[in-house]
Amino acid sequence: MLNIFGGLGKGTVSDGSEIEEVMASAVLRKRGQGFHDFEVGEVIHHHWGRTITEADAIQFCHLTLAYNPLYFNREYAKAHGHPDIVVCPQLVFNMILGLTVEICSEGLGGPFLGVYDLKYLEPVYPGDTLTAVSTTEAKRESESSEGRGVVTWFNEGFNQHGRKVIEYRRSNLAIWKGQMGGEKVAKAAKAAKGDKGNG
Amino acid sequence: MDNVARLTSDDNYFEDFEVGQTIRHARGKTMTNLENVNITNMVMNTAQGHFNEDQMSKTPLGQILCYGGVNFSLVLGLATQDTCENALAELGLDKIQLKTMVFHGDTLYAYSRVLEKRESDREDAGIVVFKHWGVNQNKELVAELERTALIKKKSHWLDR
């Protein structure tokens, strides 16, 4: 008889030792890459792509309080010459950045530092499908702290017609010795947590 | 649709902004799972520091770190009604700098200043460049950035 509670009964599917063996022998399938894996000038075509739905557009603009009716009133958007509501541009930015994270920043171990020269080139509508491309523009090792550096990419987002809808530069801190946080940061985080009374 | 001008404020058209004008926005918003984890996952940002509490509890930060894209999007959102409610388009952003880490439970507030105003290539709208700042509940600067928007002119849009 199938025992869905595993080790709780007799004749079980798993008595608990199987998962121990699995955890001990499993090989981590790593995601993300490090500072030294990037080459200036390389072009990276990112995974997945994403069709933006009306639900995405409405939820994002309302959670961020982006109150321009173009982003949530279809008749208003049509009265301004659009075929549908306009996707809040910050969702377009975040969607393109999201697609770049696994390759570009997930493995760097440091935070996102800044974005420059961002241009919204064409409106995006619900049902449009976006894809992301990055070009590694610069890599710089920190002179003051060992094991730290900054990587900068030029990111571009395209719609299903191959037209560019967004471009920008972004930089991320890379940490390959030690861990994000460090003494100063941990202390600040602890103090901030204490201030909120939820630590 | 008739009377589109009734749907938005009448004091935030192109003519209403003056260079140097500085605005404190009325509302703040507390960052929670709903903003950070939801939007991070919605946009497929795969960095688990933004959604894995267990992993982050074992780092010096001790807790989930909010994704910077959500932080500055919320700052822009908090500033949108007063600055871009009558925008025809947001044209771009620049000099986005993330200054202080944000954690769940932190509350963000926004301030804006008009940096520049100029004519556009269309008669019915002009370009305004704003600087926006986001601060947390301890008055620490969280993010600063510039936004350029194409904003309707009263002369052409108030009666429509």
Image (spheres, coloured by chain):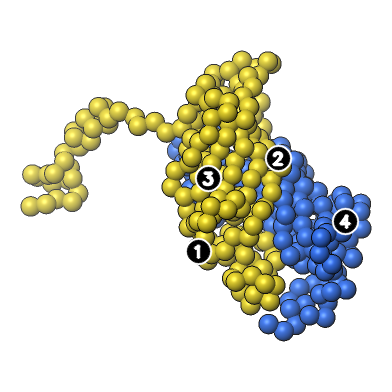
Chain colours: A yellow, B blue
Q: Residue at x 18, y 51 (%)?
A: A4
Q: Write the residue at 19% across / 49% down.
A: A5
Marked residue chain, label 1: A
Q: Is residue B50 visible?
A: no
* Residue A165 visible here: yes
Closest to the camera, between mark 3 and mark 2, is 3
Label 4 element class: strand
Q: Amino acid at mark 4?
A: Arg
The x and y percentages for residue B1 are 68, 82
Find disc 4 in the rendering and name its residue. B118
Q: CA distance from mark 1 to mark 4?
A: 34 Å
- Residue at 83 percent across and 56 percent down: it is B128
x%, y% of residue B70?
A: 61, 49
Q: CA distance from mark 2 to mark 1?
A: 28 Å
**Farthest bottom residue?**
B2
> Which residue is located at x 91 percent, y 54 percent?
B19
Q: State if disc 4 and disc 2 touch (CB < 8 Å).
A: no
Using the image, name the chain to which the residue with label 4 belongs: B
Q: Residues within 10 Å of mark 2 (few under 14, many from 20)?
A: some
Circles 2 and 1 on the same chain: yes
Say which element carries label 1: loop
Residue that badge 1 annotates: A127
Q: Which residue is mark 3?
A: A132
Distance from disc 4 to disc 3, alpha carbons, whole Å, reads 32 Å
Q: Secondary structure at mark 3?
A: strand
Q: Depth check: give the residue in front, A88 or A124.
A: A124
Q: Quadrant of residue B9?
A: bottom right
Label 3 is found on which chain of the structure? A
Q: Position of residue A49 (x, y in %)?
A: 47, 50
